[in-house]
Image: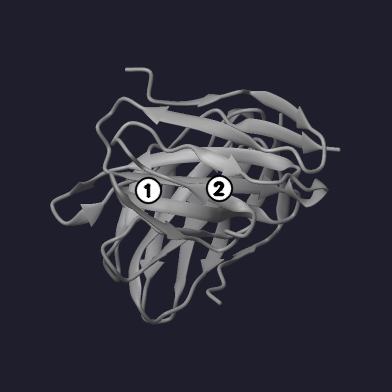
Amino acid sequence: NAGVTQTPKFQVLKTGQSMTLQCAQDMNHEYMSWYRQDPGMGLRLIHYSVGAGITDQGEVPNGYNVSRSTTEDFPLRLLSAAPSQTSVYFCASSFRAGGIHNEQFFGPGTRLTVL
Amino acid sequence: ILNVEQSPQSLHVQEGDSTNFTCSFPSSNFYALHWYRWETAKSPEALFVMTLNGDEKKKGRISATLNTKEGYSYLYIKGSQPEDSATYLCAFAPGGATNKLIFGTGTLLAVQP
């Protein structure tokens, strides 16, 4: 199993450009999430999904869109990049067994710089 | 706004020292409390997921306790080793059948040989 994969690893954008961060998992996990990590702020939840076709907003959703058309993929779209979106982005997946949510498995991260 | 706080922010110890960190979270609407270990230049990796008041979990030299009524969890490392150097994150999962996690800002542990 590849686990959770993210592409690209690094990206530089200009203000106003759009792009999609890709996330895929091959563990058949129902649940997927996107986080951003900024110095001194820890991990902040952007959007999450409890299954194909179902998404919801986290703590910091503004400026980002998501969709979940398949169990495997959960892309994050930046509609019009701003310098405030410079960050490291992590995708994570998890599953529920016996009524209990298990730990989240994290991808390697995407480091995004917006100039 | 759900607030998860961790203390201390950072900790420097000598090899062989035992140490502990605190995670404070809302005591209402509790579903689960997660602990993750995050090494520099890597991704966070799960240590424990705890759901019941009074839960105690152990993995090698690392253990954790949970008090949901007062809203805190402790992570203990016995006999710290340099390879334990990392940031330790806790995350609160509010009630509801979702994977929503609210993370604290972490405790950075540096273990000197």
Q: Is residue B79 visible?
A: no
Whether residue B101 sits left or right of residue A94 in the image: it is right
Outermost residue to the top: A1
Decide: is A106 above or below B98: above
Q: Nearer the viewer, residue B111 or A76?
A: A76
Tell me, yes or no, whether the two marked residues, 2 and 1, touch with CB atoms within 8 Å: no
Outermost residue to the left: A98
User: Dividing the image into 4 quarters, which one contains the N terminus of chain B?
Assistant: bottom right
Locate residue A6, reporting x and y percent: 52, 27
Decide: is A1 above or below B108: above
Locate residue B84, reporting x and y percent: 58, 35
Q: Residue at x 57, y 58 (%)?
A: A61
Q: Amino acid at mark 2?
A: Tyr
Q: Nearer the viewer, residue A29 or B109?
A: A29
The quadrant holding residue B100 is bottom left
In the drawing, what numbered circle is on residue B3? none
Distance from Cα at disc 2 to Cα at disc 1:
20 Å
Chain letter of the residue beneath label 1 in the structure image: B
Q: Amino acid at mark 1?
A: Phe
Q: Residue at x 26, y 63 (%)?
A: B97
Q: Residue at x 59, y 32 (%)?
A: A109
User: Dividing the image into 4 quarters, which one contains the C terminus of chain B?
Assistant: top right
Q: Nearer the viewer, residue A81 or B70?
A: A81
Locate residue B23, reporting x and y percent: 53, 64
Q: Which residue bears the numbered disc 2?
A: A35
Locate residue A46, reporting x and y percent: 55, 54
Question: 10 Å neighbourhood of mark 2: few (<14), some, or many (≥20)?
Answer: many
Q: Which residue bears the numbered disc 1?
A: B48
